């Protein structure tokens, strides 16, 4: 899928050129509402649904079927909050990706291993960040919340899978 507003332009060509790839470093699912995500090494992504075992898995059609955050942003939020190591489960995202600017996937389709996802929006922080990270957690997460995606082609997701532009 080409970036629609800039087809053929210099900016469009730049946006279509992404030799970098990322890697999944952490996967989490929430079997129950308000529960901290449980870390897993593999999970099945269900086409146009959610991740198997996640409490949202039975609800089709959502634009927020998978949430992703950059590993580098976890380091940034930890520094802002003066926390030595930030447990990815506290951030409540499904996938942590290292080595790729997730915002560069805006309006694009991308592969995570054998699973085809489509960017659907930003994943803004919620009030739970105050509970999970402490006072100021919400503001520390602003601009670092990651992205949401729809599952276009399901399959198995594994820690270590490559994330790349489709």
Image: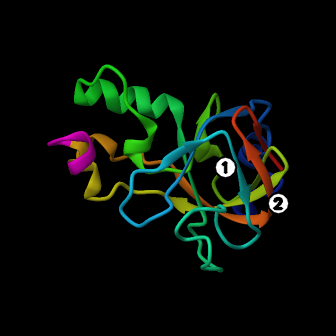
- Residue 8: percent from the left, percent from the top? 83, 53
- Residue 25: percent from the left, percent from the top? 62, 32
Q: Residues within 10 Å of mark 2 (few under 14, many from 20)?
A: few
Total marks drawn? Answer: 2
Q: Residue at point 21% right, 49% down?
A: 130
In the rendered image, the residue lying farthest to the left is: 135
Label pair 1/2, CB-CB below 8 angstroms: no
Camera-side residue of 93 and 35:
35
Please name the residue that numbered disc 1 is placed on.
105
Say whether residue 96 is left or right of residue 18. left
Q: Is residue 132 magenta?
A: yes
Q: Quadrant of residue 125?
A: bottom left
Please name the residue that numbered disc 2 is placed on.
1
Say whether residue 81 is left or right of residue 165. left
What is the spatial separation of the Cα atoms under label 1 and label 2, in whole angstroms? 11 Å
Say whether residue 90 is left or right of residue 53. left
Query: Regarding mark 1 in the picture, which secondary structure is present there?
Result: helix
Query: Which contiguous range is marked in magenta?
Result: 131-136
The colour style of the image is rainbow
Q: Is residue 69 above or below residue 54?
A: above
User: Can residue 47 be spotted in the picture?
Assistant: yes
- Residue 151: percent from the left, percent from the top? 72, 64
Camera-side residue of 156 and 121:
156
Q: Which mark is residue 12?
A: none
Q: Residue at point 82% right, 60% down?
A: 1
């Amino acid at each position: 899928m080409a970036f629609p507003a800039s087809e053929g332009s210099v900016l469009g060509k730049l946006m279509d050129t992404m030799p970098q790839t990322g890697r999944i470093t952490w996967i989490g699912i929430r079997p129950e509402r308000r529960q901290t995500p449980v870390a897993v090494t593999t999970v099945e992504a269900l086409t146009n649904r959610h991740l198997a075992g996640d409490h949202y898995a039975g609800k089709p059609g959502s634009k927020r079927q998978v949430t992703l955050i950059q590993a580098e942003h976890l380091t940034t939020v930890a520094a802002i909050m003066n926390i030595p190591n930030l447990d990815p489960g506290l951030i409540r995202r499904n996938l942590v990706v290292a080595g790729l600017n997730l915002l560069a996937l805006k309006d694009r389709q991308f592969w995570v291993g054998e699973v085809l996802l489509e960017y659907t929006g930003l994943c803004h922080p919620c009030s739970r960040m105050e509970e999970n990270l402490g006072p100021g957690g919400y503001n520390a997460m602003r601009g670092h919340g990651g992205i949401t995606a729809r599952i276009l082609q399901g399959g198995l997701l594994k820690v270590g899978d490559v994330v790349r532009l489709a």
